[in-house]
Amino acid sequence: MGALRRVKNKRRTRDYDQVVADIKTPRHLQQYKDSKDVEDLPGLGKFYCTECSKWFESDYNLKAHTKGKNHKRRLRILREEPHSQLLAERAIGLGLVDNGKREENPDEMKE
């Protein structure tokens, strides 16, 4: 059981909300890149796909990756709005009203 979990974590990439933050703010991406040792990365960390958060050995491999199905699928997913705490609250009915205050539950007000 332990070996299986290790394999799953080995191939795990960054989540979509992290990638969206990388795209929006270069500082966020730079902090992530600085946390990795350049000597341990493929191609010494020169060839990086931001959308998929993967490093490649050469520019040729990076260009081939950008033409591939997995990269295009990831781009399509990233076009959608990422999940946030606000969306989670709206899903259970704790949304905001137009004036910026939290919406009150009318059933609670009757009591």
Image (cartoon, grey):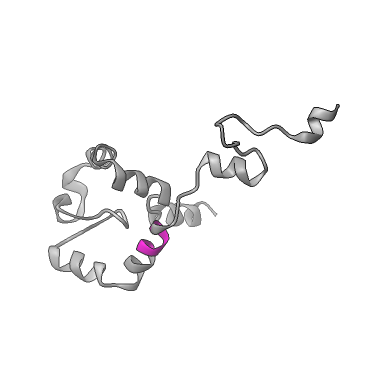
Magenta: main secondary structure: helix
Decide if residue 66 is on the left or right side of residue 60: right
- How many marks are shown on the rendered structure? 0
Q: Quadrant of residue 12?
A: bottom left
Decide if residue 67 is on the left or right side of residue 89: left
Quadrant the N terminus occupies: bottom right
Q: Residue furthest right?
A: 111
Nearest the viewer among 18 and 5 is 18
Q: Quadrant of residue 57?
A: bottom left
x 13%, y 63%: residue: 59
Where residue 47 appears, x then y in whole percent? Answer: 17, 56
Quadrant the C terminus occupies: top right
Q: Is residue 76 magenta?
A: yes
Q: Is residue 111 magenta?
A: no
* Residue span colored magenta: 74-78
Decide if residue 49 is on the left or right side of residue 20: left
x 42%, y 47%: residue: 17
Nearest the viewer among 89 and 98 is 98
Q: Quadrant of residue 35?
A: top left
x 79%, y 30%: residue: 108
Where residue 96 appears, x then y in whole percent? Answer: 59, 36
Q: Residue furthest front?
A: 99
Up/down of 68 relative to 44, above or below = below
Up/down of 38 relative to 12, above or below = above
Where residue 19 appears, x then y in whole percent? Answer: 35, 49
Nearest the viewer among 36 and 84 is 84
Up/down of 28 relative to 64, above or below = above
Where residue 29 appears, x then y in whole percent? Answer: 27, 42
